[in-house]
Image (cartoon, rainbow, N blue to C red):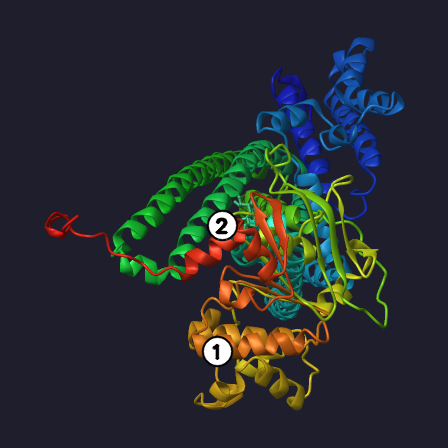
Amino acid sequence: MQKISSSSFVLPVLCVCVDVCVVRAVRLAQPCPFLLPRPFLALWGGALLRASALLLLSFLGGLRRMRGPEGLQSLAVLCFHRPAYVALLGALGRPAQEELWAWHSWGRVSAVEVGGSVSGTALKRLLGCMRPYLWRFVFVLALVMLSSYGEMAVPKYTGHMADWIVNEEAPNAFSEAIWLMAVLTVLSAVLEFVCDLTYNTTMSAIHTSIQAAVLEAVLQQDIAFFDATSTGELVSRVTTDTSDMSEALSDELSLVMWYTARFVFLLIFMLSQSWKLTLLSCMGVPIIWVLPEFIGHFRQIIAAKSQDLLAKANQVATETFSCIKTVKCFANEDGETDRYRRRMDDIYALNKQDAATYAASTWANSMTSLALKVAILYYGGLLVTEGAVSSGDLVAFVLYELQFTSSLEAVMRCYPEVKKAIGASEKIFEYLDREPQVPPDGSLEPDRLEGHVQFRNVTFCYPGKANENPPVLKNVSLELKPGKITALVGSNRSGKSTCVKLLERFYQLQNGDGEILLDGKPLQSYKDQYLHDQIAVVSQDCLLFARSVRENIKYGRENASEEEMIEAAQLASAHSFITGLPSGYDTDAGEKGGQVSGGQKQRIAIARALIKQPKVLILDNATSDLDGENRHQVSQTLLNQARSCSVLLVSNNMSMVESADHIVVLNGGEVEEAGGHDELMRRGGFYAQQVEKQHLGFQRPEEAGEEESEPD
Ligand SMILES: Nc1ncnc2c1ncn2[C@@H]1O[C@H](COP(=O)(O)OP(=O)(O)OP(=O)(O)O)[C@@H](O)[C@H]1O
């Protein structure tokens, strides 16, 4: 020790190394379940640990200046300025949460450099997902510790054997060492097997539960969210992102656990061999430690960006597959491939940056550990010559050290990967945390409902377009009476479907923008499930699921009997064609109902609505694909059905609208006129013009030559 203290540079360098090591150790320990909820403890405990380590080193190393008042003052400022600052922030009522996670100045600087980090919160959430499996993790950790301890047998007994070969004093030592080494190694391997099995099944359970939770959270969102988010992005979040995160986390976390346990045991065993050589080994640690931290931040940002790009690429693919007929029709396969390739090129550019960073960090780590090994062999050789350690100890130490640096390197290599997984989880938690923009569910679910709907002076703009002028609906008042058919007609974009969406409670009215009443009570006071049981909508895009016709009709009413299903299908004029399908009601409708024709799809959708026996039935352009015969049958169904509920018919097909009891004409989001067919025809307004236009045939323009030859 005297030798070390006499050199003017070794001790200060050692102080810096120890300081860095303590700081990193506390930062790594911060997310552990004990310290995570106690950031103040980590902050002050870390500072105390740091101060004690430095103080101890200056006393042991004989740094006299450090022991004086000036030295102690500097030490106090270095170690306690951050905790004091954060405590002051807390006392002044200023937000200190962010600061708690960067308890030393340069940690804070690195956090700022990468544009702020929210990984503390994401990590907390991830640990939260693992909490239900806490005991399994405790079990795995215990096995990891035992197995790692067993692995120490090989270097330890190799050292003993080296001593035996040199001294030849204890003839039994050789066989004893071999025997113990073999038993401990086999035990360690068995423990590793059990541990891997438990760990992998646990992580797979966590993955499945996160994926289900993300899908559940997405499905809970309001319609405005789905309007604003592409299908590709949603699919990407639910499938790719959760898989990436779980895989990275599962693989890397396991490595971090294994290598950390190994690292701790190796450190203990190395200290027991020679504390001087251990100190020398630790001098390379800061480089191996600090570098991956910076790289981890960088890769975290790249991971988030690449997720966004992947979601966009997925969107192109999803869109192309869903519109494949249009793509083929325009022979634009190459165009779509180019679009996809351009997105993939952006991801490739990011991946190149990622790969370069990773390669640089691996190279730097290898160089450091190589230099360290040379230094240890040189210094160790000197110690053996002086007789301070035996040659067996040096052999064991070198073997420990080989594993020590590789364990540290492995932990540090995994650290950025874990951060990358945390980066990926941030996006997923964004979805899990998103509160749907819908008011709290109502509580009304009366036994009897008439189905009387009233729109009173409703004015509406879509979310995010609040300042839109004119609004989509302006002062709209209309009524759907039980037992009556009300038709809503108007030009394109006049707001007909918007009225339907409001009735389905997909969007909310702002205060003062009128009200929608169902049986005299505000729509939002009804329970969501109840409301959707009572209001059935067959819309223009009445897509079917890729399931059997039976499952499609019983969708949402799985308990309905066979008779109820057939009755609903008969009412919708669907029964005869369904029984003619290859497997009748068990025929697969295909993706988006692709296995049946447009008209059949609509009739199945009408049956799906009727099976609910709704009190309000809405047909939003749902008869557009029906031929004359079927349209007649559906009109008849409507007339029959109207006796037991209120029917809203949104259509521009005037022959169907004529049968309605009341017709409301929308124009530019306002009610232009309303009344019965005859009354509106007499009035000669917008409605009458529309009817006339539909009755007019197409006329070919007369040819110029003919015109000329016609006599005046
Ligand atoms: N989800 C939405 N987000 C923003 N604007 C929307 C949304 N849906 C519809 N709009 C706009 O609201 C207006 C009314 O649309 P709506 O679909 O209600 O009219 P419509 O009368 O049913 O039209 P069409 O007969 O063409 O189906 C249009 O300008 C449309 O662009």
Q: Which mark is residue 630?
A: 1
Ligand 1 lies under 8 Å from the Cβ of mark 2: yes
Is residue 171 or residue 333 the one in the foreground? 333
3D distance between C-alphas at marks 2 and 1: 25 Å
Q: Evaluate whether residue 8 shows in this view.
A: yes
Instruction: Report helix, strand or loop for mark 1.
Output: helix
Q: Which quarter of the rendered picture does the N terminus lie within?
A: top right
Residue 595 vertical placement versus 661 (above, below): below
Could you say where residue 492 lies in the image, as x and y percent from the top left? 49, 50
Taking the spot 85% from the left edge, 72% from the top edge, the residue there is 447
In the picture shown, does residue 335 fall above or below 210? above
Q: Residue at x 68, y 51 (%)?
A: 432
Q: Position of residue 337 (x, y in %)?
A: 30, 52
Residue 87: x and y in percent read 85, 24
- Residue under label 2, please give it: 492
Q: Amino acid at mark 1?
A: Asn
